[in-house]
């Protein structure tokens, strides 16, 4: 299996279930329309890409520094606006808002990076790479359905999720009540399909031909 990120031979195999959600705005509020992928898919990620992710996600890593830079800039611009236009109320409120936004962003990023680092530090090497591989997969997996109407999210299918109760999975992966039973049938089926599906999945059609 090839790595989803770089195309090299992958050493981590991830199983995932795709969840497609469309948010319809009705008179009675936001009504999500949801459907699940036809089967649990397997994707490969190589150790090098997982390693790269771990380095970039850690404190002082590229991804974290980039965010610090963005919020730092917002803070700086806010401060400059306050200095330059402190006599004008509109300038002053805009400047103060920017300073707060920058500060809040910096603090949030710092706390997030610290939590993630702590989480990664406490994990076994194997678990750490598996988590990093999952993040690499998420970065490269498509975020929209082909028709662009549905947002795509993914749920990992592994020992951890298979041992979870439906309610926890619904909250964690934002699964609508109508999809829960199907989701449970799919993640507990060794072939990753819903045995109650009447139509054969594409892989089976291929085999028949
Ligand atoms: Zn790779």
Image (cartoon, rainbow, N blue to C red):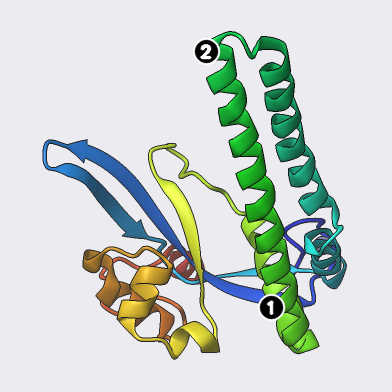
Residue 18 falls left or right of residue 9: left
Q: What element carries label 1?
A: helix
Residue at the spot of label 2: 90
Q: Nearer the viewer, residue 2 or 173?
A: 173
Residue 154 falls left or right of residue 169: right
Q: Is mark 2 on a helix, strand or loop?
A: helix
Q: Tell me, yes or no, if residue 140 can be seen here.
A: no
Q: Where is residue 154 in the image (x, y as percent from the top left)?
A: 50, 63
Q: In the displayed orientation, state which residue is furthest to the front.
A: 87
Residue at the spot of label 1: 119
| Label 1 Cα neighbours within 10 Å, binned few <14 / some 14-19 / many ≥20 | few
Q: Position of residue 140 (x, y in %)?
A: 67, 53
Q: Tell me, yes or no, if residue 105 can be seen here.
A: yes
Q: Which residue is drawn at 51% across and 78% down?
A: 157
Q: Which of 175 and 66 is in front in this view?
A: 66
Q: Which of 128 and 34 is in front in this view?
A: 128
Q: Residue at x 27, y 67 (%)?
A: 179
Q: Where is residue 52 in the image (x, y as percent from the top left)?
A: 85, 62
Please identify the quarter of the rendering in which residue 3 is found: bottom right
Q: In this view, does 147 lie above or below 199?
A: above
Q: State whether label 1 is within 8 Å of ligand 1.
A: no
Q: Quadrant of the N terminus?
A: bottom right
Q: Where is residue 91 in the image (x, y as percent from the top left)?
A: 58, 14
Q: In this view, does 168 lie above or below 68?
A: below
Q: In the displayed orientation, state which residue is furthest to the left.
A: 28
Q: Residue at x 68, y 17 (%)?
A: 81
Residue 90 falls left or right of residue 113: left
């Amino acid at each position: 299996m090839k790595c989803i990120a770089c195309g090299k031979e992958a050493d981590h195999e991830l199983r995932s279930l795709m969840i497609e959600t469309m948010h319809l705005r009705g008179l009675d509020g936001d009504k999500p329309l949801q459907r699940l992928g036809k089967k649990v898919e397997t994707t490969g990620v190589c150790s090098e890409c997982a390693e790269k992710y771990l380095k970039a996600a850690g404190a002082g890593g590229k991804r974290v520094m980039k965010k610090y830079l963005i919020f730092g800039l917002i803070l700086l611009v806010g401060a400059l606006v306050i200095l330059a236009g402190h006599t004008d109320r509109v300038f002053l409120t805009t400047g103060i808002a920017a300073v707060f936004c920058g500060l809040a962003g910096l603090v949030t990023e710092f706390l997030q990076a610290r939590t993630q680092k702590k989480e990664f530090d406490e994990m076994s090497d194997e678990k750490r790479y598996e988590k990093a591989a999952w993040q690499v997969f998420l970065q490269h997996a498509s975020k929209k359905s082909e028709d662009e109407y549905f947002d795509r999210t993914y749920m990992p299918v592994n020992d951890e999720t298979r041992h979870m109760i439906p309610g926890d999975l619904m909250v964690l992966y934002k699964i609508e009540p109508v999809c829960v039973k199907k989701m449970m049938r799919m993640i507990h089926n060794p072939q990753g399909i819903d045995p109650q599906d009447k139509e054969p999945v594409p892989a089976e059609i291929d085999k028949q031909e």
